[in-house]
Amino acid sequence: MSALLYNEDALTGVERLADASVDLVIADPPYGLGKDYGNDSDRLGAHEYLIWSRRWIDAVLPKLKANGSLYVFLTWQHSPEIFSYLKTRLSMVNEIIWDRRVPSMGGSTRKFSSVHDNIGFFVKSRDYHFDVDAVRIPYDAETKKARTRSIFVGKKWLESGYNPKDVWSVSRLHRQHAEREDHPTQKPIEIVERMVLASCPRSGTVLDPFMGSGTSAVAAARNGRSFVGFELNPDYFAIVEKRVAEAASSRNGKKHAAAGLSSVL
């Protein structure tokens, strides 16, 4: 397992990567909504944003293996156009709705409040890697009790859990959350880890062209996948380095503890 982290623009940095060298791309680009990331990356007009989106897509896609996959975070403002472009290059498997579980506190008076992100799941070929067993959600005791009829006895899914489906209700990270770093659009590890476990084989490599706070790098490190990532902002890059070092140290500690227990037994 390795982690290659680059403090530079992915549009030029990915050129150094060999084609067909990564198993999974997780992309969380600026949404084109004018947020401050310490640079002008999110302050393009709508037309310029779509042109820029095509540029990073064209730069990244050759790096995917023949059975590779891509997840991209977007919002409703630009997801239709970007999904349409991606479908000219890849096959779309799912549009996943991330319900951020935003609490009700009045909201907009001129439209329905937006409380979700759109995630596109795309693959390069029909034999893409996908391990649903690695991401099944266990049934609670009450649900298991309700499934005691004879037709359910012995069913694998009852013991192993259910497919997470395409609506993921996972709370956004509030400022007081223990996982939260100093980044305005940090994604929860639960969501990104699900992508890594389902769509990157154990010996595989994850590429993130927009690392942000480094959640994808942490998910890869925690689960023994190699990682390559790019981040333009030096302050965010420092956060990524810290988080990856902590994740790697924690994983190594667990491995050593397990090895010690094994030798005792």
Image: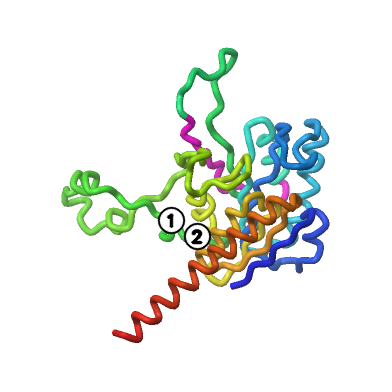
Is residue 98 covered in magenta? yes
Instruction: Name the colour scheme.
Output: rainbow
Residue bearing mark 1 = 135
Q: Quadrant of the N terminus?
A: bottom right
Return the x and y of residue 20 as percentages of the image width and height. 71, 66
Residue at the image position 80 percent from the left and 35 percent from the top? 44
SS assignment at label 1:
helix
Viewed as shown, does residue 57 lie left or right of 115? right
SS assignment at label 2:
helix
2 over 228 or under it: above or below: below
Residue at the image position 54 percent from the left and 52 percent from the top? 192
Return the x and y of residue 252 as percentages of the image width and height. 49, 73
Viewed as shown, does residue 123 lie left or right of 40? left
Viewed as shown, does residue 253 lie left or right of 43? left
Q: Which amino acid type is shown beneath numbered disc 1?
A: Val
Depth check, front residue: 47 or 13: 13
In the rendered structure, which segment of residues is drawn in magenta? 87-102
Q: Which amino acid type is shown beneath numbered disc 2?
A: Leu
Q: Are marks 2 and 1 in contact (CB under 8 Å)?
A: yes
Residue at the image position 63 percent from the left and 64 percent from the top? 227
Q: Which mark is residue 197?
A: 2
Is residue 133 covered in magenta? no
